[in-house]
Image: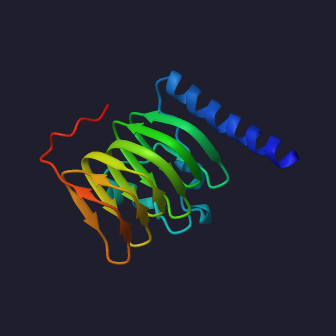
Amino acid sequence: MEDILNSLKNTFWVLLAFIIGHIKGDSYSFKKKYKNSNDLKGVDMSNQKEEYGEDITTIIAEDLEIKGTVKFKSSLMIKGVLEGEIFSEGLLVIGPTAKVTATITTKNFISHGHVTGNVTASDQVILKNTSTHQGDITTPNITIESGAVFNGGCYMKLKDINVL
């Protein structure tokens, strides 16, 4: 029972910080806390712009488990467990420690971790060599690195996929 309460308390504080940052108009960023830290386990955050084309503005930590719907406009990295739906107008990065079971609609999708569910990306999907994906992918542009596991269908259209 105490573990559940601590997890809920941690989730509350992370979400509160995220909400306050967005209300103030400055995307609250957890990246400074994790920059060059061992907590990122395999993801070098020092070259975010080179790796992802932009800075990651929010990170869902390894010890967080979320069930429900997540919507965002900028960028998000998931390192924990998420079950539900994800809607994004920006970049979604699945970290190497993440376990995501969701229907995902986003602009750009990069996976280092484990995803079960269908992904629709209006720009591109990248499955890194550490990723496993169970489900269909719909996107005009896909890259699957050697070592990635992909079990599902791939549907490619010419940039006419609408996000949100």
Q: In this view, does 63 lie to the left or right of 145?
A: right
Farthest-out residue, top = 23
Which residue is found at the position 15% from the left and 39% from the top?
160
In which quadrant will I find the C terminus? top left
Farthest-out residue, right = 2
> Which is nearer the eye, 35 or 41?
41
Can residue 154 be seen? yes
> Which is nearer the eye, 22 or 69?
69
Which residue is found at the position 34% from the left and 55% from the top?
52
Total tally of numbered discs in the picture: 0
x, y percent for residue 92: 40, 48
> Which is nearer the eye, 75 or 49?
75
Which residue is found at the position 26% from the left and 64% from the top?
143
Can residue 128 be seen? no
x, y percent for residue 131: 43, 67
Hey, which quadrant is residue 1 in on the image? top right
x, y percent for residue 30: 56, 45
Farthest-out residue, left = 158
* Vertical relation: 11 (above or below) 94: above
> Which is nearer the eye, 70 or 42?
70
Hey, which quadrant is residue 112 in on the image? bottom left
* Vertical relation: 35 (above or below) 27: below
Hey, which quadrant is residue 79 in on the image? bottom right
Which residue is found at the position 61% from the left and 66% from the top?
38
Q: Which colour scheme is used?
A: rainbow
x, y percent for residue 129: 39, 73
